[in-house]
Amino acid sequence: MKVAHNKNTWGCAALIAALLLSACGGGGGSGSAAAPVTPVTPVTPPTDTTPGALADGNSYDSSATGSLAAPNESAAVIASHIQLNGAQFNYTATSGHLTATDAQSGKSASLFYVAYTANTSASDLSKRPVIFFYNGGPGSASMWLHLGSFGPRRLVSTIPSASIPPVQIVDNQETLLGNADLVFVDAVGTGYSQAIAPSSNADFWGVDKDAVTFRDFVQRYLAVNQRTASPTYLYGESYGAPRTAVLANLLETAGVQLSGIVLQSSILNYNSNCGVLDPGAVSCEGYVPTYAAIGAYYQRSTPALPSDFSGYLQQARAFASGDYRAAMTAWLASRTPAPAAVNAQLVNFTGIPTATWLQNFDLGPDKFQSNVLPGQLVGRYDARVSAPNGSALTADSDPSLTVVNKSFTSAIATYLSGELHYTARTAYVPFADIVSRWNFSHDGKNLPDTIPDLAAAMTQNPGLKVLSLNGYHDLATPFYQTELDLARLGPEPLLSYKFYSSGHMIYLDDTARRTQQLDLINFLTH
Amino acid sequence: MNPTAILLTALLAMGTAAAQTNPGPGPYLPPDKRMPSSEPAASGPALRMQAIQKLKQRFEQADLDGNGRLTKEEANKGGLGFVVQHFDEIDSAHHGSVSFDELKAYLVERRKQARAQHIPGNDKLP
């Protein structure tokens, strides 16, 4: 076996967790004679004696050439509980790998997942829904949804406050585990997921191949765990939304009937989001209502405090699809300056001065970040988080990322070894910079438009429920662009939308997450 | 250039830099991949046609003998679990094989019925 990056072998977190365990007596380790081991070499990994713990002997490599020689389907299986609404809620946390094999190409990958299942009878399990969660990027592991949203344990966040809270993991009162079993899965090259030899990671870095791997993983998970009768849901965030559209179609074609899909903070069509393209390439119409929402949040709009926020946003949508669209069409075609009334309306929504709009009529979200508040940079993921230019919180060019990024990255490592009792010989990879290697082409276009995939999934499964979740202050995947993209489907009785006063990772806001939980329970049960 | 203009230029430059650094969990395209399609995004009947084309492509890939019809075995081999599961309903004429037009007719009819009856999405169909 090739020994790849020996990244942080037996990281500090794992060591501390193991030391704590041994200090506490190991929590119910077997009484059999623990033979005293002569310390031949100091690199012997610490042993986690918790029942069900797994020390995976594999090293995982997230690089393009990463190719796993000896995959396993082992898992740490840990009996756990949380205090939920004042009562003890028992569940099992399963962390490990399953092999996803494409029967057509024979290619396979070893995908890392963490599954939370309620302790209930086998007959009840067949009726309990299973939800598969994954983030996007491409290149992001699923740690944001895993530790931030609806799992049984949650990392404390104080968004939209512009401060970094201490790392603290708590029992999550907004968990969906009371209603469904939850599976968090990492894409190839992220987390602990890796291609299996002779394939290498880069073979899976594309819109279509990635979705095929997720399809094969979902099928493998349902089969291994005897959950093929369970109502099955997908929950994708950001790039995870187009992944969901492609995946839903692939699953339906493969004969896995889904009950519903959740598209959170979506970029369903890369050809329509001006924020990921060069300035002046496409209209920023989809961002205009988001700009208006942020203008109102900072009271830069006129009126500064709209008395009827949803009416105000409705007005912004109407302006975007009306006068703004007409002016932008002329501007894109021949750089025709926008009518003064259109610029004036943009000033009213945002407080950004006329001079800026005259110079940048197609103002994109990156420029908006640094122009809406004088002397400040507002967040891309959550524009409610702001910081003075040049301050420490602007180090990542997004204060809303800086306030959470390091906490999540450190917490996932500690949590995996300390609570889930899964360790490997390498460190978990929260983010892999693979986007330049990603093959975005799909259906003959350079950039994916996945609305046809969604339409194909809905054609095959007329009972498929679709829920679009959106944050008003998200400057990465604006809510109105998602509405425009999904409107292409025409009237769909099972398609619904929810909106929250939050950002891209909607659930990082405590109030939004509470509402989101109720909306999701409603979605699961109706 | 007056001080306001200099500041504005600096801020705009900063904004550009923001799009090129740490993408985090959100979407990002490197400059060389920013090549949007010039085709208008399909909706309505054109979109439904694209969706059907996607299915047709899979159907044709599975049609190993190229006779325009799939047996259950071909469908199974081609990973078309949907066709396998609904084979007898699609093959209402009992040919022992199904054409794409028969599959399409089945899908259209099923969707029509579902819309009329509001099939709850969380019920697994047999």
Image (cartoon, coloured by chain):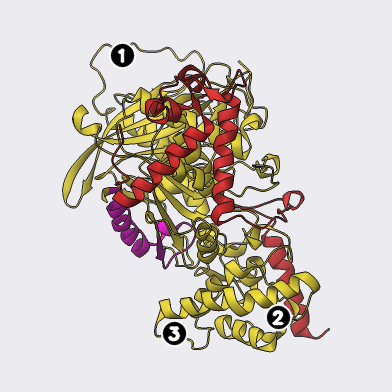
Query: Of label 2 and label 1, which has the lower sequence position?
Result: 1
> Mark 1: which amino acid?
Ala
Which residue lies at the image location 50% right of the left edge and 60% below the top edge?
A: A487
| Residue at mark 2 shares a chain with residue at mark 1 | yes
Residue A375 within the magenta-colored segment of the rendering: no
Q: Nearer the viewer, residue A256 or A501?
A: A256
Q: Which chain is yellow?
A: A
Mark linked to residue A306: 3
**Of residues A472 and B45, which is closer to you in this image?**
B45
**Dot 1 falls on which chain?**
A
- In the image, residue A83 above or below residue A370: above
| Chain that is coloured red in the picture | B
Q: Residue at left 43%, top 30%? A: B82
Residue A331 position in % (x across, y down): 74, 74
Q: Name the residue under label 1.
A: A34
Q: What element carries label 1?
A: loop
- Asked whether the beta carbons under mark 2 and mark 1 sit within 8 Å of each other, the answer is no
Indicate the chain on which mark 2 is placed: A
The mark lying in front, picked from 3 and 1, is: 3
Dot 3 alpha-carbon crowd within 10 angstroms: few under 14, some 14 to 19, many 20 or more: some
Q: Residue furthest front?
A: B93
Identify the secondary structure beneath mark 2. Answer: helix
**Mark with earlier residue (3, 1):** 1
Tag 3: amino acid: Pro
Q: State which region is magenta.
A: A497-524
As measured in the structure, the alpha-carbon distance from the residue carrying label 2 to the one carrying label 3 is 23 Å
Residue B60 is situated, as x and y percent measured from the top left of the image, at: 60, 28
Q: Can residue B9 be seen in this view?
A: yes
Q: Where residue B100 is drawn, which disc sits there?
A: none
Quarter of the figure with the N terminus of chain A: top right
Q: Which residue lies furthest to the right in this view?
A: B1
The residue where tag 2 is placed is A356
